Amino acid sequence: MRVDPTLVRSGQWWDHKIPPVIAAAAIVLGAGPRVGVGVLVDLVLFLVATVGVAAFGHVVNDLADIRTDAIAGAPNQMAPLSPAARTGVLGVTILAGALPWIWLPHDATVLTLLGVEVVLLTAYSVRPVRLKDRAALGVLADALYAYVVPILLTGATFGRVNDVGTPPWQVVASVAAWMLLMGLRGILWHQIADLAHDRR
């Protein structure tokens, strides 16, 4: 397994999780009446928040897996760090994921989807729930937090940003369904690649 040079393992998720979010934002923005500097600022802030939340999920996963990864001989970005450094890295990801929402427009739907994303990321790795140890539930949770919920969150957020009113949900839903299948495929391939480690 390749070891990502960054503490948040961005090389393992940036290329296939961030572009669909940007594409979904573009679809919703294209359906609205305006695209100006303010909208572009919102897009950049949303990207920062998305990266922060994704990084949070990977840091939490590594923190929860320090012992099991040591047994399996698998790389873990958090293992070499001191407790203070681990707390610092986790804190930075939380700030990056949360602070942009002071500026970004949000309503109950947006905040609910954001909460669902954080809960899924945490429940996937952290005991006593630890969905990643629960077969099909873990596979579904991974596909949801990695692809489906971010797409729905993007649609809800940028529908407000660009005064779309009701976003083109038929398009967003179609993309979300595609993302679900893509996510299921991705996590299953990942589990196959990790089979030797998991057996240990």
Image: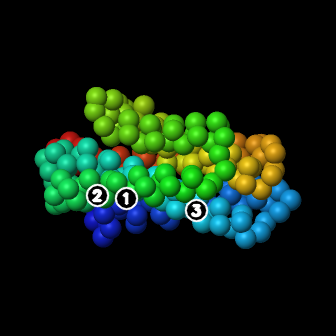
- CA–CA distance between discs 2 and 1? 6 Å
Please name the amino acid that badge 2 sits on: Gly
Q: Which mark is residue 181?
A: none
Q: In the shown orientation, is residue 59 left or right of residue 162?
A: left
Residue at the (73%, 54%) spot, across then down: 161
For label 2, the residue is 88
For label 3, the residue is 45
Residue 130 placement (x, y as % from top left): 32, 34
Q: Disc 2 vs disc 1: Cβ atoms closer than 8 Å?
A: yes
Residue at the (57%, 48%) spot, across then down: 150
Q: Residue 12's image quarter?
A: bottom left
Please name the amino acid that badge 3 sits on: Leu
Quick one: label 3, few (<14), some, or many (20+) residues within 10 Å? some
Q: Work out whether residue 193 can be spotted.
A: no
- CA–CA distance between discs 3 and 2? 22 Å
For label 1, the residue is 92
**In-front residue for pair 175/29:** 29
Residue lying at the far right in this picture: please name it.
Answer: 33
- The kind of secondary structure element at disc 1 is helix
Give whichever of discs 3 and 2 has the lower sequence position: 3
